[in-house]
Image (cartoon, rainbow, N blue to C red):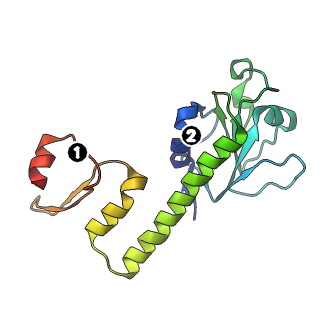
Amino acid sequence: MKITLNIMLDAVKGNKPITGSIETSNKISQISIFNPSKTDLVKDCLYVINLSDLIKFNPNQSNCYFIAVQDDFAPELKSISLNEYYNTIFIEEKTNIINVFDLLQTRFNAIYNWCEEMDNCLIRKKSIQDVLCLSEKIIGNFITITDSSFSLVAYTNGLECKCPQTNDLIK
């Protein structure tokens, strides 16, 4: 299973991510904390790395990605040429690398579990309403599904809808 970086960035949006020179539509298959003693990096992996380690090792790779966390040993981001670091997302706010990894891993696991549950819905031939209810936590947006005559088929009933017309349709 591969997940786009922009979905993963949503997990750390409170830490002010700066995308640098990276396509957030690229996909990852796993997350790991960067280990400076390892020379082989895994393809399609998102590595969480301290900014000071990124500067020291400059692991510019075309087949994996990095999320650099500001740490006590690194200069401020504004003094660094961010475009020099290929496939890297920078966290502007100074924080702990473990906290960022935990946020990303929690998000990755939630999506992985959701995909398994979606597979089970398909196997058990659940309704479209069941699929939407299952998807509420992952999608996070209110969704309605109507048929060709604009009759309501399903909607995310656990999320608030701010549209008066849609609320009238639901009633």
Residue 86 image label:
none
Q: Quadrant of residue 19?
A: top right
**Label 2 near label 1: C-beta < 8 Å?**
no
Residue 12 image label:
2
In the picture as drawn, the residue positioned furthest to the top comes out as 79
Disc 2 packing (10 Å; few <14; some 14–19; many ≥20): some
Q: Quadrant of residue 128?
A: bottom left
User: Is 162 drawn above or below residue 104 in the view shown?
Assistant: above
User: The C terminus lies in which quarter of the figure?
Assistant: bottom left
Of labels 1 and 2, earlier in sequence is 2
User: The N terminus lies in which quarter of the figure?
Assistant: bottom right
In the picture as drawn, the residue positioned furthest to the right comes out as 37
Q: Say left or right for 128 vs 114.
A: left
Amino acid type of the residue that numbered disc 2 sits on in the rendered structure: Val
In front of the other: 85 or 126: 126
Residue 134: horizontal and vertical position, in percent?
Answer: 37, 63
What residue is drawn where x is 80% and y is 54%? 41
Q: Say left or right for 119 vs 100.
A: left
User: Is 66 drawn above or below residue 42 in the view shown?
Assistant: above
Rounded to the nearest whole Å, what is the CA distance between mark 1 and mark 2?
25 Å
SS of the residue at dot 2?
Answer: helix
Instruction: Identify residue for label 1.
Output: 161
Judge whether residue 63 can be spotted in this image: no
